[in-house]
Amino acid sequence: MNEMTKIETTLKDWETDQEVRWCPGCGDYAILKAVQRTLPQIGADPSNTVFVSGIGCSSRFPYYIESYGFHTIHGRAPAFATGIKLANPELDVWLVTGDGDGMSIGGNHTMHILRRNLDCQILLFNNEIYGLTKGQYSPTSRQGTSSPSSPLGSVDRPASPCAFALGSGARFVARGFDVSKNLPDVLKAAHAHRGAAFIEIFQNCIVYNKDRFDDFAAAKGVEDQQLWLENGAPMLFAGGTKGIAVDIETLKLKIVDVVDSNWQASGVAVHDVTNRGTAYKLIALRQTPKFREFPMALGVIFDDPRSS
């Protein structure tokens, strides 16, 4: 993010008088609160902040943030955000999109804003379904997903937003999920990055794809299914009893047991956010049947300020 004058605000300063019109229990509520909590912490100025969105449930976001906002057209939010930032470089630009808006009709625009490294924060809400148009399968839906547009189950392989972002040249790639207490920290890290910062946020669509992410993002009992990454820290999970190591023969990631907290002896790898090759491997964990036994990699996966 470019240098800006920090001011003191509260969460209330970022709330609008608009009725929030998402389904009761929608994960978007939690994401909205996480963003509204984060903005005061980074010293953001409502008069210098703009939220841009396309079309979809997530794209109602600008109505609920007390700042400048632009609810644009389907898939084209990156193009509008690019114009806004080029015309007003001092603005703090946030782009909100979804797995359909950002990965289907807007996939080419998402690719180019990442490739050009426009200084903005891109939040992609991934619920693996088209919610606004009543539950059709999306580019990120898992194979076999039954929906109005795939009544016998989808046959397409799902796209990975984070892998897409890395392949498009993104310099910052992170993951979180809607109700995570760590989401504000991920948002702050994205804002601190100079250049395009991409965050995939897993979001529960309670009507059309309920509890899709409960295997790793449920409220309780799934801590051993989450790998929260921290630069310079060992990649530990399951309360520190397991870790991620590199197989020296295949160069693939593997799970190892950690005895008596001695992660060094177990060969647990230390996370390096500037390593693009490792980032690709971390993104793949739990995303394909071959890596299903691994935890989901969350937090800042890749951040290389040297290339921004």
Image (cartoon, grey):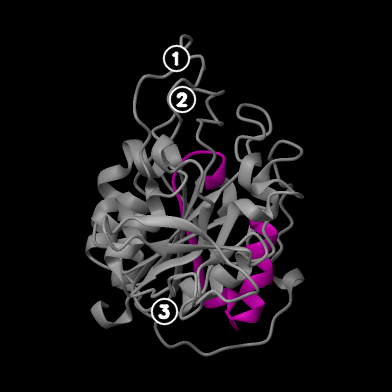
Q: Nearer the viewer, residue 249 or 21?
A: 249
User: Mark on residue 249?
Assistant: none
Location of residue 98 in the rendering, given as x and y in whole percent from the top left corner? 47, 44
The mark that comes first in sequence, 2 or 3, is 3
The kind of residue on which mark 2 rests is Tyr
Residue type pointed to by label 1: Ser
The spot of residue 10 in percent (x, y) is 74, 77
User: Which mark is on residue 1?
Assistant: 3
Helix, strand or loop under label 1 = loop
Disc 3 vs disc 1: which is toward the camera? Answer: 1
At horizontal 59% and vertical 74% (from top left) the residue drawn is 46
Q: What segment carries the magenta color?
A: 31-59
Q: In the rendered image of this protein, does residue 83 appear above or below residue 20?
A: below
Disc on the earlier residue, 3 or 1: 3
Nearest the viewer among 230 and 269 is 269
Residue 185, position in %: x, y? Answer: 59, 72
SS at badge 2: loop
Q: Circles 1 and 2: CB distance less than 8 Å?
A: yes
Is residue 73 part of the magenta span, yes or no?
no
Which mark identifies residue 150?
1
Q: Tell me the quadrant of the picture where the N terminus can be found.
A: bottom left
Q: Is residue 210 left or right of residue 105?
A: right
Q: CA distance from mark 3 to mark 1?
A: 41 Å
**Which of pointers 2 and 3 indicates the residue nearer the eye?**
2
| Residue 55 visible somewhere in the drawing | yes
Q: Earlier in the sequence, mark 1 or mark 2?
A: 2
Classify mark 2: residues with Cα within 10 Å, few (<14), some (14-19) or many (20+).
many
The residue singled out by tag 2 in the image is 137
